[in-house]
Amino acid sequence: MKDVKLFTDGACSGNPGPGGYGAILKYGDHVKELSGGFRNTTNNRMELMAVIEGLNQLKEPCRVSVVSDSRYIVDAVQKGWVRRWESNHWMRNKKEKALNVDLWKRLLALLRKHEVTFTWIRGHAGHPENERADHLAVSAATQPGLPEDVRKD
């Protein structure tokens, strides 16, 4: 399996509001940058989209190290929360539905395809790839004519 690094970030102006995601894939000497945005979304959705879009670029199963400043994603995966939500019919507890189910389903499918580990880093702390992913996300969020973020929960 190829060893790939994926650096991700999401941004949102207002929450909800216009938002964007940025992702940087690194494999050996190869680097690929991705970004996109939506006109009415949330920061957590953009954080998820960054990871999903990055993993979607991989044409074969890979060993992927995801580096993210999103506790929402890193904790949900590492602490098993998302798999518990899935097994509980997308309920966080007896009264609260899980949020962003459409994106979590997409991410879980990708996690079953690849061997993925997650590392949390502090955002805006000078990490070069995190700063670049943030720049990509913020730039994407400010583009004209952004599409609507169609939720399929």
Image (cartoon, rainbow, N blue to C red):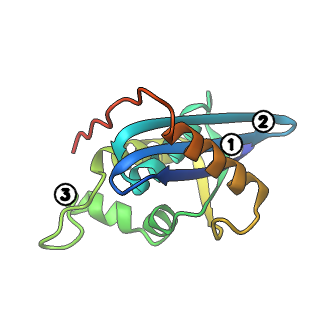
115 or 65, which is in the foreground? 65
Q: Position of residue 67 (x, y in %)?
A: 65, 58
Do the residues bearing badges 3 and 2 touch, measured as CB atoms within 8 Å?
no
114 to the left or right of 109: right
Identify the residue shown where x is 44% and y is 45%: 19
Q: Position of residue 83 (x, y in %)?
A: 36, 61
- Cα–Cα gap, marks 1 and 2: 7 Å
Do the residues bearing badges 1 and 2 touch, measured as CB atoms within 8 Å?
yes
Within 10 angstroms of label 3, few (less than 14), some, or many (20 or more) residues?
few
Label annotation for residue 89: 3
Identify the residue shown where x is 19% and y is 62%: 97
* Residue under numbered circle 1: 24
147 or 48, which is in the foreground? 147
* Residue under numbered circle 2: 31
Identify the residue shown where x is 32% and y is 33%: 148
Mark toward the viewer: 1 or 3? 1
Looking at the figure, which quarter contains the C terminus? top left
Mark 2 residue type: Val
Q: Mark 1: which secondary structure?
A: strand
